[in-house]
Image: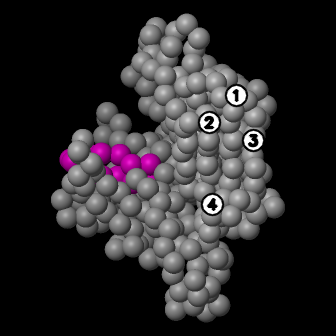
Amino acid sequence: MAYDPQEVDMSLIIPGGHTNATVIGLIVQEIDQQNNVLFQWRSWDHMQITDATQENLLDSVIDYVHGNAIEPDNDGNLLISSRHLDEITKINKTTGAIIWRLGGKNNMFTINDDIPFSHQHDIRRISNGNITFFDNGNFRFPEYSRAAEYSLDETNHIATRVWQFHRDPQAISSWGGNAQRLPNGNTLIAWGGCVNTVTEVKHDGTVVFEGSYVPGIFTYRGYKYDWESSPIGINSENNSPLEFKLMQNYPNPFNPETNIKFLLNKSAETTVKIYDISGKEVMNCFSGFLNSGSHTIKINGSSLSSGVYIYKLVSGKYQAAAKMILIK
């Protein structure tokens, strides 16, 4: 799953639109071990830009899909979550055709829920055949985030909420979050950008565990697994990574703050800089000596314009770069 920025003349689609707007689509691919593309699906072929009812279509940068989860379904097809469409979509893995659309402007289901889901994350098919997701709740009233479980009648297109959990008092997460159904039937919930906590709850809503980070640290996804005493890729003597790696910034797209995480396999003089798409340096995020290990830098893009940027990590003889998207 990857974002796909394209230049689009939005004035042909909506009055007053930018003639050279950057519109961000979604690409889904299956790739084999030799990097051959076995399957590809493009939002451009199936979803209209105007399906994004909460996005500013007059802006110079329009993230109209914002896919944030992909799930191989039990029948071999694919489920995807598209945050900015408020939609969960089932895709035919053979033909690429849309089988059904749940939520959003093109909803095909009767939804038995007293509040519609909105800007959701982390669609998952669970062992009982139902789906779970983290419902962020942006752009609706009342605004609050929750974990939810739906049963789906895919023949008659009926979706029914069978379980939910929200915080008390209610909290709204503008980004991130997930819900993991555990083998014991409990659900682990990470609250994304609203609460620096992960919560495990029973089906009756009883909280059995909460773990919190220091203020200012949030969880895009949280998972619970059995402890492994010797994690692969970690040097047990100095706890430093065995690789040099630049992670995708999170959140992305962002406004105005985001985090850049990277791993250094050796201690060295290190720089992290941001460039615009013409190659001009627009921000020096860090310059100095860093020890080997994992590092995270928080940046604030309030001084930058909306658009696509390149962030570059240079440490000793190693370097890497990636794209980030600022939307205001």
Q: Are marks 4 and 1 in contact (CB under 8 Å)?
A: no
Whether residue 99 is visible here, answered yes or no, is no
Of labels 4 and 1, earlier in sequence is 1
Q: Position of residue 133 (x, y in %)?
A: 48, 44
The single residue placed furthest to the left in the displayed view is 94
Is residue 187 inside the magenta stretch? no
Q: Residue at x 73, y 30 (%)?
A: 289
State the CA–CA distance, disc 3 to disc 1. Answer: 10 Å
Which stretch is magenta? 69-81
For residue 34, side relative to residue 243 (left or right): left
Disc 2 target residue: 315
For residue 73, side relative to residue 207 (left or right): left
Name the amino acid, label 4. Tyr
Of labels 3 and 4, earlier in sequence is 3
Judged from the image, the secondary structure of the residue bearing numbered disc 3 is strand
User: Which label number is shown at residue 309?
Assistant: 4
